[in-house]
Image (cartoon, rainbow, N blue to C red):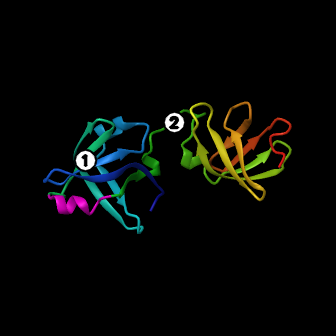
Amino acid sequence: MSELVAIARVAKPRGLKGELVADLLTDFPERFDRLVNVIGVFANGEHRELKIEDAWFQNDRIVLKFEDIDSIEAADELRNAEICVAESDAVKLESDEYYDWQLQGCEVITVVGTTIGKVREVMRTGGTENLVVENDGGDVLIPFAEAMCTEVDVEKKRIVVDPPDGLLEF
């Protein structure tokens, strides 16, 4: 099975006919307008193929109605499941844009070849995103800016950085 990308997380059943309220995990909510087949992933690792019958937005959430989920009890079984699509079905980004999951696990090295560590997560603070890089000396925050990150190769899981003096001193 290909890698999966979460686009929503079921919060709770809605009504008596099997509808579900879900929190959006995608920056592209319009994708639900044409989306039919998805995969529900549960905390225990179980996967379940689901077919969207209907979807509409309510406030900042999406309401989903899946085929063969026709009662509140059946809907409740999907509570907390992540609604996913195959990585190959992810919305295509511009060449200089990346999903967080593409950056996670990338090895970070300096332009002179010094290994800094691996990206654990992308931290969003309202301005420039920061790469949280795991290092033997603790986490290192590296601004994910074009001037700093001179090369990003998500296929090879490698990011080359040109840090200013003092940024990497522990």
| Amino acid type of the residue tagged 1 in the rendering | Leu
Local crowd at mark 1 within 10 Å, few (<14), some, or many (≥20)?
many
Query: Quick one: label 1 or label 2, which is nearer the N terminus?
Result: 1
**Residue 74 lies in magenta, yes or no?**
yes
Crowd band around label 2 with a 10 angstrom C-alpha radius: few (<14), some (14–19), many (20+): few
Q: Distance between the residues labelled 1 and 2?
A: 25 Å
Q: What element carries label 2?
A: loop
What kind of element bears circle 1?
Answer: strand
Residue 166: x percent and y percent? 85, 39
User: Compared with residue 153, is residue 125 higher up or lower down, i.e. above or below?
Assistant: above
**Residue 115: percent from left, percent from top:** 80, 52
Quarter residue 125 falls in: top right
Q: Mark 2 points at which residue?
A: 93
Q: Give the range drawn in magenta.
A: 71-79
Residue 64's label in the rendered image is 1
Task: Tell me the residue at 22%/58% (across/down).
Answer: 75
154 vs 32, left or right, is right
What's the residue type where badge 2 is placed?
Answer: Leu
Name the quadrant of the N terminus. bottom left
- Using the image as rendered, state which of residue 72 and residue 163 is in the foreground: 72
Splitting the image into 4 quarters, where does residue 165 fall? top right
The location of residue 32, given as percent across then percent down, is: 31, 40
On the image, the x and y values in percent for residue 124 come to 57, 39
How many marks the image carries: the answer is 2
Viewed as shown, does residue 123 lie left or right of 13? right
Residue occupying the point 78% across, 56% down: 137
